[in-house]
Image: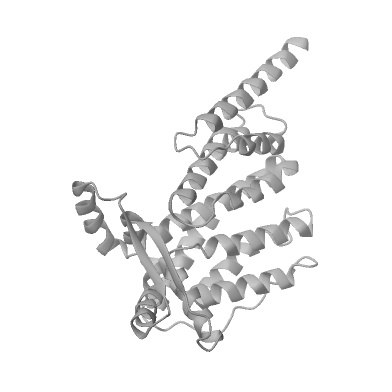
Amino acid sequence: MSASDDSILSSLRYLFADFLDEEDTTPPFLPLGLPAGAEAIVTDGIHLLMDYQGASYAKLYVERLQRFIGRQVTDAATFCDIARLMANRMAYEDAIRIAQLKLAEYRTSDGRIRSTEIHRFRYDELVDALPGVAAKPILMVLGKLGWEHRRVAIPFSTVNRWGIRRLKVEAWLRRWRMFSIRYAQERVWVERWLHMIARALAKQPQAVGAVVETATMMQGFGDPYRRGLADWHAIIDGLAKPTFDGDLPLTDLAGAIAQARAAIMPDPRQLALKRAIAEIRARAVGAAADAAAAE
């Protein structure tokens, strides 16, 4: 069974534990063999994910980290970056998370900090946070109406009893988060990111840091998040994967990733990024052809 299959089974096991309200609330143990300096970062990641989703989700985080302990990671800094960025990505921002944070802010301040924030979400973005069985028919109706990309303003208010009650309902929906369409998409992304890191370790170790840092391309929610995700896939599919597959003779993947990221613009058509990737690929192929001709 592959590491990806193990992760899927782990996700399902933890998901149903959450659903049946049988989850152990005990934090997972730190994995054995952590490199120097990683204990505090991993501990922070566990606490973040305990708060975000629960003990089962934190255990999934630890299981994912164990793939890189005592194996190919050549330095502690790389492992720490993986641990930090993976925790941040697993705690992706959605309406449920914003509600959690606003309630926590209100409670820890004994009600002194009052939120009046309003965020705008696309309809499909809100529906994606629901379990697939409920979300899919709603998305179908929204699609027929042409409303998937319409935006709605959602208040995250703690200024009165009604607002606090709304936030509690929204935060409670975390119990369903691991059934959601968005969670399934995020799980696939994390697994692919980890897979690309493992391939970089095996194929081009000097590019590992650049591949790890691509996790910072996705931030927040809404259009900025979606553009970041699309840009990430463009770089991975256009540069990293073909290099690892042996289809692109790119000797400096780290430099290529940096150049491509520098070309990113807030453009849903990705014109500048696609042009930069095409130029990088053309140079790599040309350099390889020149080298072969000179032999």
User: 120 left or right of 52?
Assistant: left
> Which quadrant of the figure has residue 282?
top right
Residue 139 seen in render? yes
Residue positioned 55% across, 26% down in the render: 275
- Give how far across and how far down residue 11 sits, in percent: 46, 66
Q: Quadrant of residue 43?
A: bottom right
Name the quadrant of the C terminus: top right
Name the side, left or right, on which 207 lies relative to 182: right
Closest to the observer: 241 or 245? 241
Q: Position of residue 253 (x, y in %)?
A: 68, 36
What residue do we see at 46% from left, 61% from top? 8
- What residue is rendered at 65% in x and 73% in y? 44
| Residue extending farthest top | 293
- Closer to the camera, 145 or 236? 145
Of 172 and 153, the residue lying toward us = 153
Above or below for 94 versus 54:
above
In the picture shown, does residue 15 fall above or below 211?
Answer: below
x, y (%) of residue 207? 71, 42
Residue 13 seen in this snapshot: no
Residue 114 in the image, given as x and y percentages of width and height: 48, 79
Q: Residue at x 60, y 60 (%)?
A: 86
In this orientation, which residue lies closer to the viewer: 100 or 17? 100
